[in-house]
Image: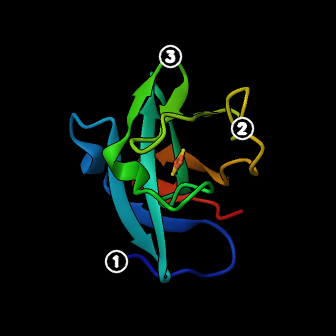
Amino acid sequence: MAEARPGPTYLGPASLLGDRAITPVRVGGRQLILVRDGTRIVAAERACPHEGADLSLGRCAAGRLHCPRHQASFDLRDGSVSPGWSFRALRLSPVAVRPDGLWVSLA
Ligand code: FES
């Protein structure tokens, strides 16, 4: 479990995600998921902003994260929700891939 401190937080080695598209992690008491979108990795809150479904059970396709409960989807560039939904955007945090591993800058 990574500690939350000011500035970027170390998550683990670059191999942390393995071949998974979505990996749950805990950072300083926050439940997050790491989502691989092509070569890019982004961190997102784990609970869906609609009714709290576990987004680690969702799927990632074409730059969007799909919630497993009601199938709303989120743009992995800005967290915006798919048309037809009126709840807030998914909170995202950038993840940097450095020679020593993965670092997240919490929003
Ligand atoms: S709980 Fe995620 S779309 Fe409803």
> In the drawing, what numbered circle is on residue 46?
none
Q: Nearer the viewer, residue 42 or 87?
A: 87
Please indicate whether residue 106 sits to the left or right of residue 42 in the image: right
Instruction: Say what secondary structure mark 3 lies in.
Output: loop
Residue located beneath label 1 in the image: 1
How crowded pointer 2 is (Cα within 10 Å; few <14, some 14-19, many 20+) is rated as: few
Identify the amino acid type marked 1.
Met
Above or below, 31 relative to 14: below
Q: What is the quadrant of the N terminus in the image?
A: bottom left
Measured in 3D between alpha carbons, the distance from the residue under mark 2 to the one under mark 3, in whole angstroms, is: 19 Å
**Drawn side of residue 97 relative to residue 50, left or right:** left
Q: Residues within 10 Å of mark 3 (few under 14, many from 20)?
A: few
Report the residue marked by disc 2.
85
Residue behind mark 3: 62
Amino acid marked by disc 3: Ala
Residue drawn 48% across the image and 34% down it: 71
